[in-house]
Image (cartoon, helix red, strand yellow):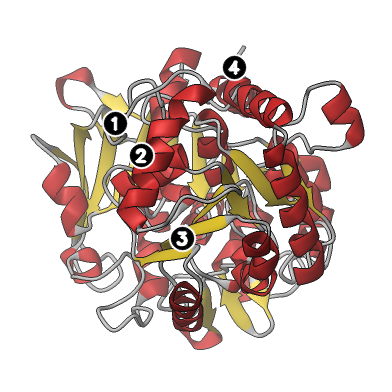
Amino acid sequence: MRVLSVASECVPFVKTGGLADVVGALPRVMGGQGVDMRVLLPGYPKVKAALGQTREVMEDRTLFGGPGRVLSGTAEGIDLLVLEADHLYGRDGTPYLDAEGEDWVDNPERFAALSWIAARIADEGVSNGAAGGWRPDVLHGHDWQAGFAPYYLKTRGGTVPCIFTVHNIAFHGSAPAGRLGALRLERSHFVQDGGFEFWGRIDALKAGLVWADRITTVSPTYARELTRPEFGAGLDGVIRSRAGDLSGILNGIDTEAWNPARDKALVARYRTPRGKARNRKALRQEFGLPEAPGPLCAVVSRLTQQKGLDLLLDALPALLDKGGQLVLLGTGEAALERAFRAAARRHPGVAVHIGYDEAMAHRIIAGADAILVPSRFEPCGLTQLYALRYGTVPLVALTGGLADTIIPASPAALAARASTGVQVYPLTAETLALRLMDLCGLFSDRDIWRMMQENAMAQPVGWETSAAAYAALYRDLAGTP
């Protein structure tokens, strides 16, 4: 079984969010399911620098404004197909933003090119040297950047089945209607029903939803949420029309990279919750926090409205009044960065690091007593899975993958000694404040808290179950036993 995975980012080569983690994890775990997966990525400078020996396996001399070619190589144990097109990807900045933080003006063409080449590979295959050719049995596209891949493949008469995974429906990949020709799109498909038109604009995400054979999301609850107007970002009607082709497969995490017993970033490695004590002490010293009677809570997150962190600012006094503390690591919206810096100046129990540091994230999650994830929506979420692995009790909103992965501290769950965290619903500053006070109450009962930590560390958070689900979906689509 051969699968082409198409995405704009992939750990460890380039990452802006959880999409990269999933795209990087899948080829590593699918081999155990009998799946030969290759990942098609744009040829950003960092991606090309990671490649060792390569060979050219496809050429396209007129690729959306210039020449391009596909290079085949292996890096970090992942079989890569890298689209080298310097006029599209050979530039500084993030995959999507320039040095001033603005979208690259040619983003529609940059990722249409990625989708175009994906469709060519699916339809024609690529040269594989002396071993012959390689052609996928299934094309698997991720988010809007691969949204036109099913469209290009189907409109050129290709028969390879397509899966399209929505990691975050908030990002559509929108472009003006005047770029139809530049993006090699048929005007007859620029329609609302059964096409890629959305409020008078071209919508790459919608194209993926319409032309893919199957649609997946990254958690079962998020799949259900996307059929509702409050979560569907205007595309809930399209998703409801595809309900029979929609499924949610929960993300996993790399349990080797996130393993408190082997994590080299930690002051002290551990296998049981008792081992967190030295990491907690070291974390307080690193961030200049005094000892405190309440839980040391953490936020490791992009600082955006989606993450509900404005609500946390309003609810923060409830945590601090109970003797709790907060350590925050993240970067994002300038207003939130300023607000958390101001909170740290006002409160000795708050410490903030604006930016991102992977080793620091590991130290924070290991040293904290609790992780706070009050997201307004969360397709899957990985932070709470990391926290479970490290015995750090999650407090989460009741949405998306957060709802699917945390067993709330309800009276029944506590009586059954099954709880792994605290859930907030409905998500308001007032209810978040109440649940923070509940968290402090649970923390004060050492028997209950230790039970929750032990339950957390026992949860299955790896890819085993999800990999089997993807393999079953691939084989069903390809008609392979």
**Residue highlighted by disc 4:** 480
**Residue highlighted by disc 3:** 328
Q: Tag 1 or tag 4, which sits nearer the N-term? A: 1
Q: Residues within 10 Å of mark 1 (few under 14, many from 20)?
A: some
Q: Tag 4 or tag 2, which sits nearer the N-term? A: 2
Q: 318 left or right of 297?
A: right
In space, the residues marked 2 and 3 are separated at their CA atoms by 33 Å
Q: 399 left or right of 49?
A: right
Residue 384 to residue 261: above or below: below
What's under tag 4, amino acid-wise?
Answer: Thr
In space, the residues marked 3 and 4 are separated at their CA atoms by 48 Å
Residue 26 to residue 114: above or below: above
Q: Are marks 1 and 2 in contact (CB under 8 Å)?
A: yes
Quick one: SS at disc 2? Answer: strand
Q: Tag 3 or tag 2, which sits nearer the N-term? A: 2
Q: Tag 2 or tag 1, which sits nearer the N-term? A: 2
In the foreground, 134 or 445: 445
Quick one: SS at disc 1? Answer: strand
In the foreground, 370 or 52: 370
In space, the residues marked 2 and 4 are separated at their CA atoms by 21 Å
